[in-house]
Image (spheres, helix red, strand yellow):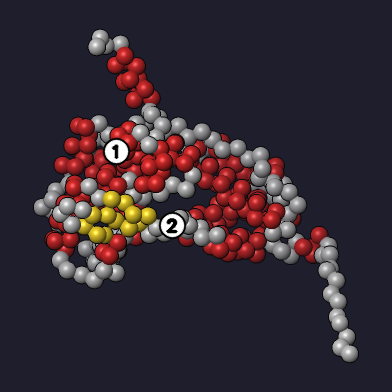
């Protein structure tokens, strides 16, 4: 009769669990993020934030490690204060670090590497841009006419610009597009935005303006296979995020709005779409937001818009 073996779970002392060091914990965290279908950009950002914390822990707090089992909430709070008041990072940047620390804290708690949610009381900071992301009709005309359609990359740049203005795509979504993601005819069209940040693919309808821009660009570019990148550089390589951001910044500067960026054009679209539709759920769907609260932030009226509305009430009807 075979002997049945029994195995007893061995409790590892704290000093030995410290061998489960920071690098190992961060690597396990990254694997878990990928398992949860988080985007590569998110994983890279979180890794960078955690590495920055480890550097602060060793050199500023002058502690050995960091060892996950010995992390304390005061360590994380000291790091956030350092970012905000010593390095003087923007609220948006600090909130990105806080998001990384919160996600990592949840992981090490669930994974049994720590006994508490050490980032539970970390605060985020209110983001006050102090600017109006919505372009006036005059600024919009200047932005559109800033592109020289007869220039070397004019039709490409104009098509990219219209995808921001008419569809509200993210920069990362624009550069990821391939030819077969675009179905465009003279009277109808849509663009397939591939899985990003763990979201499902979504189809975004194309209006007449962006259909014409894409058809003109594809006609000027010539025939190609469906798997090729939609937007390419002069070396026929897929445009990078940095090159698109620089491109949009250049045209915004010509239009007199060098305080804005490509992300602000997405916000401009969100505000315009919501104003015309009055439907927050539809706005959420077209923007590809998982959380409707994110969409609500995009559609918040600016101080200038509120002031204009108040002034309009003072005029006789």
Can I make out residue 153 in this image? Answer: no
Among all residues in the image, which is located at the extreme left? 150
Give the label on residue 32, or none: none
Q: Tell me the quarter of the image containing the N terminus.
A: bottom right
Q: Which residue is mark 2?
A: 200
**On the image, which quarter does residue 177 sit in?**
bottom left
CA distance separating discs 2 and 1: 33 Å
Across and down, in percent, residue 221 comes to: 16, 63
Q: Position of residue 70 (x, y in %)?
A: 75, 53
Task: Tell me what residue is drawn at x 70 percent, y 44 percent.
Answer: 73
Q: Position of residue 178 (x, y in %)?
A: 29, 63
Question: Few, some or many C-alpha atoms within 10 Å of disc 2 (few <14, some 14-19, many ≥20)?
Answer: few
Splitting the image into 4 quarters, where does residue 270 fall? top left
| Secondary element type, mark 2 | loop
Identify the residue shown where x is 53% and y is 62%: 34
Eye-nearest disc, 2 or 1: 2
Q: Which residue is mark 1?
A: 258
Q: Residue at x 43, y 57 (%)?
A: 200
């Amino acid at each position: 009769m075979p002997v049945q073996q029994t195995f007893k779970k061995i409790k590892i002392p704290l000093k030995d669990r410290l061998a489960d060091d920071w690098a190992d914990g961060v690597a396990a965290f990254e694997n878990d993020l990928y398992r949860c279908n988080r985007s590569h950009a998110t994983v890279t950002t979180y890794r960078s934030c955690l590495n920055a914390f480890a550097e602060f822990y060793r050199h500023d707090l002058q502690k050995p490690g960091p060892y996950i089992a010995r992390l304390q909430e005061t360590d994380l709070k000291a790091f956030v204060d350092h970012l905000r008041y010593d390095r003087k990072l923007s609220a948006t940047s600090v909130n990105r670090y806080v998001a990384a620390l919160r996600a990592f804290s949840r992981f090490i708690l669930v994974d049994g590497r720590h006994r508490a949610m050490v980032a539970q009381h970390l605060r985020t900071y209110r983001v006050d841009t102090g600017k109006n992301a919505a372009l006036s009709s005059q600024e919009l005309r200047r932005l559109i006419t800033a592109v020289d359609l007869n220039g070397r990359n004019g039709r490409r740049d104009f098509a990219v610009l219209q995808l921001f203005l008419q569809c509200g795509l993210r920069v990362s979504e624009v550069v990821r597009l391939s030819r077969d993601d675009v179905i465009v005819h003279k009277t109808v069209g849509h663009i397939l935005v591939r899985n990003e940040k763990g979201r499902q693919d979504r189809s975004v309808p194309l209006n007449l303006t962006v259909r014409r821009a894409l058809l003109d660009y594809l006609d000027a570019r010539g025939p190609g296979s469906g798997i090729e990148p939609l937007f390419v550089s002069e070396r026929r390589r897929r445009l990078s995020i940095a090159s698109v951001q620089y491109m949009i910044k250049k045209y915004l500067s010509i239009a007199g709005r060098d305080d804005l960026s490509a992300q602000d054009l997405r916000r401009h679209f969100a505000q315009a779409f919501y104003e015309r539709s009055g439907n927050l759920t539809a706005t959420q769907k077209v923007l590809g937001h998982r959380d409707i609260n994110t969409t609500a932030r995009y559609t918040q009226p600016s101080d200038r818009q509120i002031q204009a509305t108040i002034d309009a009430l003072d005029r006789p009807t």
